[in-house]
């Protein structure tokens, strides 16, 4: 087994946090993974992985070696892609990330259209409700909602969304429509722990920022679950406007406190800065920018109509 194969196995073990999981990912036998790691540690002369019966962790040397492996293998991939013409022809594997609900509603349908248009590209979509480190996790393109702070990224704005409070018309008929954010303290509130909107709810009143920390009666782990509970007429929730655009348009949910909403958040297609951008990345970015930019659900211009 050559050293490049060993590096790939080591990366898989580190990222999957287990020998068996790495073997499944690479489609090789667990003993082969064990032998490869043992051979690496013997040749290098240091322990890369700390093993117990229940867990596996990188040692300090292993962490440094993992970073070097990622850099070396990335350089090899780039050299091979350049030789194969991938900087002019879209081809190879493309890794994309987005939040779960946004990915399911807007990105997943577009992935099928893109690969039909560019059959030499294979896409892996990582849909998670966390901010993924693009460099560390090998992400080519990310769809972000909110303002960016990294200086090593290019970003193209494709839309914007509002932070909205919603409930059913029936719930508001029974309990009254709040006229000020402070009145939500007596409401039945369901929150999603997957949302960055969970803890402090920000509002604006006559240009002044308002912040409230409400005690939810229900906390769930998914945005869609919070929306489903609100649709039952149990209470109110705070979500991003795209997440309930269809329900609001159908009259199932009603928005309240719109005059107190903070500024809309940008939706951006993001990729890492580089002197050379592979064709698979720039064609996918252009494709998303065109398709998402035309979606009315991602335009937060008129309150109550997005």
Image (cartoon, rainbow, N blue to C red):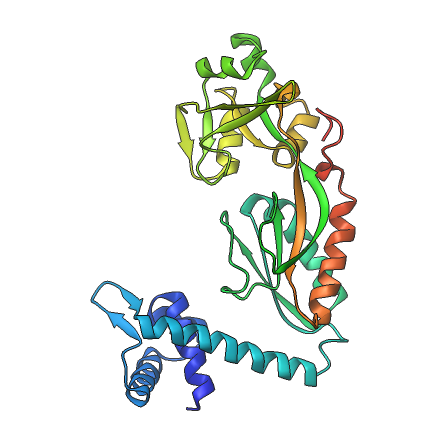
Q: Nearer the viewer, residue 237 or 138?
A: 138
User: Residue 231 location, x and y as percent?
Assistant: 55, 25
Residue 110, image quadrant: bottom right
The N terminus appears in which quarter of the rendering? bottom left
The C terminus appears in which quarter of the rendering? top right
Number of numbered discs overlaid on the protein picture: 0
Is 113 rendered above or below residue 174? Answer: below
Q: Nearer the viewer, residue 100 or 178?
A: 178
Is 148 rendered above or below residue 180? Answer: below
User: Residue 290 location, x and y as percent?
Assistant: 78, 52
Q: Nearer the viewer, residue 256 or 68?
A: 68
Is 1 rendered above or below residue 252? Answer: below
Q: Residue at x 75, y 27 (%)?
A: 302
Q: Residue at x 20, y 66 (%)?
A: 53
Residue 62, image quadrant: bottom left
Q: Is residue 196 left or right of residue 245?
A: left
Q: Is residue 199 left or right of residue 239?
A: left
User: Residue 158 location, x and y as percent?
Assistant: 73, 47
User: Residue 234 location, x and y as percent?
Assistant: 48, 20
Residue at the extreme left of the image, as rendered? 53
Q: Is residue 140 left or right of residue 286?
A: left
């Amino acid at each position: 087994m050559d050293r490049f194969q060993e590096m790939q196995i080591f990366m898989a073990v580190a990222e999957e946090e287990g020998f068996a999981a790495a073997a499944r990912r690479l489609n090789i036998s667990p003993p082969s993974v064990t032998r490869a790691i043992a051979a690496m540690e013997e040749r290098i002369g240091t322990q890369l992985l700390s093993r117990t019966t229940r867990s596996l962790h990188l040692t300090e040397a292993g962490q440094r070696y993992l970073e070097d492996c990622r850099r070396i293998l990335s350089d090899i991939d780039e050299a091979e892609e350049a030789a194969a013409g991938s900087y002019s022809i879209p081809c190879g594997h493309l890794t994309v990330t987005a939040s779960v609900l946004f990915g399911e509603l807007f990105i997943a349908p577009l992935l099928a259209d893109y690969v039909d248009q560019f059959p030499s590209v294979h896409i892996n979509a990582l849909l998670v409700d966390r901010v993924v480190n693009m460099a560390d996790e090998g992400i080519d393109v990310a769809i972000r909602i909110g303002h960016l702070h990294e200086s090593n990224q290019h970003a193209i704005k494709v839309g914007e969304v509002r932070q909205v409070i919603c409930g059913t018309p029936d719930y508001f008929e029974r309990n009254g429509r709040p006229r000020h954010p402070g009145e939500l303290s007596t409401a039945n509130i369901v929150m999603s722990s997957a949302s960055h909107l969970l803890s402090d709810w920000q509002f604006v009143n006559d240009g002044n920022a308002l912040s409230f920390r409400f005690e939810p009666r229900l906390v769930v782990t998914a945005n869609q679950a919070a929306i489903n509970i609100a649709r039952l007429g149990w209470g109110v929730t705070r979500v991003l406007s795209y997440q309930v655009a269809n329900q609001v348009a159908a009259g199932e949910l009603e928005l309240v406190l719109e005059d107190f909403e903070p500024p809309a958040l940008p939706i951006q297609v993001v990729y890492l800065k580089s002197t050379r951008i592979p064709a698979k990345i720039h064609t996918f970015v252009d494709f998303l920018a065109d398709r998402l930019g035309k979606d009315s659900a991602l335009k937060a211009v008129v309150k109550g109509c997005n």
